[in-house]
């Protein structure tokens, strides 16, 4: 990303003048924290089709029919989140708050914006770091260390002889149980489920009231999340940070961990 380019300078000027910023993030935001995206070449959905692994009926059917595949999916999804740390892009977004009001709207479930220090984060697809009961009743927070233990247990049982559905259920019991009296699950939005509230409604309001939206690392293909961009006021600036490009008039093609710190520094100083 050429910081002397006209488009970079224009984006920095617009961000400097902005009075209300929304940063809308997708999987690419956390790629440099070691968490794979969904639709890139190495993306999770290429190995694990979402119809079978990201809907509740699909996941339950797969768990019975192919418990080993489901264990592999959970290891691939949860392992990186369990040991992730914020990257320089997350930290730059948190720093921007010292200069102007910032709302982060994220599709990510990894809790990295909060860990970086962002204070207003709407998690429209929920969070892997919270456990809920029936009706999404909040039950407890889940630490990365606890998540790492579940991943370790999965790695251990998957290699054992006679591994089957009951062993899978036992390994994931700290995060998932579907008994009549004993029901809990991660507070994440699977395909076909309603968006996380109140975060989704708050995100729409924030976008409708911003004068600068920075979209970072999202393919913009998943509804209804991608429809948030339709709510941006006409006179507002939309900056896109993504090596592959995406929606937005000002395209900064490059990785979030490099472009965001440069943009925030150019707009607001070191
Ligand atoms: P995708 O995997 O669809 O898109 C990832 C985007 O990140 C692509 O546009 C990449 O070019 C970009 N990217 C990759 N590395 C990057 C980097 N270092 N810096 C910046 N951008 C980078 O992920 P999302 O758009 O987040 O939902 O997908 C949206 C939703 O689809 C997810 O929240 C998830 C998934 O299915 C559910 O599971 C409900």
Image (cartoon, helix red, strand yellow):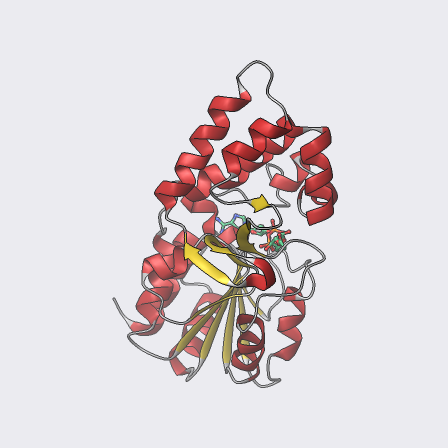
**Residue in the foreground of this view, choosing between 40 and 228:** 228
**Residue in the foreground of this view, choosing between 242 and 113:** 113
270 left or right of 229?
left
Q: Is residue 265 visible?
A: no
Please provide percent x and percent y for residue 173: 51, 39
Q: Is residue 206 above or below residue 153?
A: below
Q: In this view, does 144 lie above or below 16?
A: above
238 left or right of 114?
right
Please provide percent x and percent y for residue 266: 34, 68
Q: In which quarter of the image is residue 53?
A: top right
**Residue in the foreground of this view, choosing between 172 and 3:** 172
Q: In this view, does 240 lie above or below 16?
A: above
**Residue in the foreground of this view, choosing between 1 and 214:** 214
**Residue at horizontal 61 percent and vertical 43 percent from the top:** 40
Q: How many marks?
A: 0
Q: Can residue 178 be seen in this view?
A: yes
Q: In which quarter of the image is residue 4?
A: bottom left
191 left or right of 88?
right
**Residue at horizontal 54 percent and vertical 40 percent from the top:** 77
Q: Is residue 233 above or below residue 123?
A: below
View extreme (left): residue? 270
**Which of the image's four quarters has the C terminus?**
bottom left
Please provide percent x and percent y for residue 139: 46, 58
Please provide percent x and percent y for residue 133: 54, 57
221 left or right of 43?
right
**Residue at horizontal 57 percent and vertical 13 percent from the top:** 161
**Residue at horizontal 35 percent and vertical 79 percent from the top:** 100
View extreme (front): residue? 181
């Amino acid at each position: 990303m050429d910081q002397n380019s006209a488009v970079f300078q224009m984006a920095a000027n617009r961000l400097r003048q902005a009075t209300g910023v929304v940063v809308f993030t997708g999987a690419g935001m956390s790629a440099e924290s070691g968490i794979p995206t969904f639709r890139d070449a190495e993306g999770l959905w290429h190995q694990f089709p979402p119809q079978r692994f990201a809907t509740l009926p699909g996941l339950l059917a797969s768990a019975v029919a192919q418990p080993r595949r489901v264990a592999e999916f959970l290891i691939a999804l949860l392992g990186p989140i369990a040991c992730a740390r914020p990257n320089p892009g997350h930290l730059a977004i948190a720093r921007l708050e010292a200069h102007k009001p910032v709302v982060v709207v994220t599709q990510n479930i990894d809790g990295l914006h909060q860990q970086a220090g962002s204070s207003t984060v709407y998690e429209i697809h929920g969070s892997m770091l919270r456990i809920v009961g029936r009706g999404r009743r909040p039950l407890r927070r889940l630490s990365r260390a606890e998540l790492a233990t579940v991943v370790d247990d999965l790695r251990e049982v998957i290699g054992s002889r006679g591994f089957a559905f009951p062993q899978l259920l036992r390994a994931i019991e700290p995060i998932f149980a579907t008994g009549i009296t004993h029901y809990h699950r991660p507070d994440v939005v699977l395909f076909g489920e309603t968006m996380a509230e109140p975060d989704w409604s708050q995100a729409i309001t924030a976008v409708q009231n911003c004068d600068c939206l920075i979209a970072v690392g999202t393919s913009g293909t998943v509804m209804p999340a991608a429809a948030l961009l339709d709510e941006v006021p006409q006179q507002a600036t939309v900056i896109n940070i993504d090596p592959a490009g995406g929606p937005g008039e000002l395209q900064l093609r490059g990785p979030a961990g490099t472009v965001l710190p440069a943009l925030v520094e150019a707009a607001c100083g070191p």
